Image (spheres, rainbow, N blue to C red):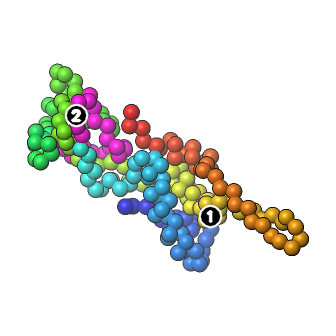
Amino acid sequence: MADLITKQEYKTYAGISSTNQDAEIDFLIPKISQFVKTYCRRTFVDYVSDIKTEVFQGETDRFILKETPVTQVISVQYSADYGQTYTNLVKFTDWVSDGDYIIPISNSGTFPKAINGYKVNYFAGFDDVPQDLKLAVLDLVTYYRRNDSAIHSTKSPGTNSLQIEYISTTNMPAHIKRVLDQYMADYT
């Protein structure tokens, strides 16, 4: 889907004016954008103008929508035949949206259990990627370009040989992790 930064944004950020590294940058940007989306459990920009559809089973007091921030709920629908056909529920009669939640309006306060029984269609995300998130993505591109996913250090064990030590780590740079953690979706 959509990348979180452009090649030109990265080249401006990194002070690159030549086209020598374009292939590497073009290779990294979509993969790092996907990494950030996976890590944060949301896409940020993919459903701003494309409809996101989610199916729920009911037996809950709210549907927690995965993409945030929700900008518009198009419809909430119900199926009595396990998702083969759906009918629209009425806003402010059957349901109401509360930010990133769909809440039932009923005496019981829950959506009754129904396998594939509820479908929500909505728009969500940011028109423009937030600046702090964009900076984290730019820094991740630089991190992968420079570190090649490991830290390389040369070490001379003797006079006739050269040894390269690869130190791999599973830790993301702390300044990038702090930003991404702020945008991580929490479905509880």
**CA gap, disc 2 to disc 1?**
46 Å
Against 46, residue 162 (above or below) is below
Q: Quadrant of the N terminus?
A: bottom left
Q: Is residue 20 visible?
A: yes
| Residue 70 magenta-highlighted | yes
The residue located at (47%, 58%) in the rendering is: 33
Q: Give the percent coordinates (x, y) of residue 26.
A: 50, 70
The residue located at (32%, 37%) in the rendering is: 64
Q: Is residue 141 left or right of residue 183?
A: right
Query: Considering the numbered disc 2 on the image, is that residue within a helix, a strand or a loop?
Result: loop
Under mark 1, the amino acid is Asp
**Residue lying furthest right in this view?**
159
Under mark 2, the amino acid is Gly
Q: Is residue 174 left or right of residue 7?
A: right
- Neighbor class of circle 1 (other Cα within 10 Å; few <14, some 14-19, many 20+) is few
Query: Considering the numbered disc 1 on the image, is that residue within a helix, a strand or a loop?
Result: loop
Question: Which of the two discs, 2 and 1, labels the residue nearer the N terminus?
Answer: 2
Q: Badge 1 is on which residue?
A: 148
- Neighbor class of circle 2 (other Cα within 10 Å; few <14, some 14-19, many 20+) is some
Q: Is residue 90 left or right of residue 56?
A: left
| Residue 43 magenta-highlighted | no
The residue located at (84%, 66%) in the rendering is: 156
Q: Badge 2 is on which residue?
A: 58
**Relative depth, front residue between 98 and 165:** 165
The number of discs equals 2
**Residue lying furthest top in this view?**
107
Q: Is residue 92 visible?
A: no
Q: Give the percent coordinates (x, y) of residue 135.
A: 55, 54
Q: Which residues are magenta?
A: 56-77
**Relative depth, front residue between 162 and 37:** 162
Q: Quadrant of the C terminus?
A: top left
Q: Give the percent coordinates (x, y) of residue 79.
A: 13, 41
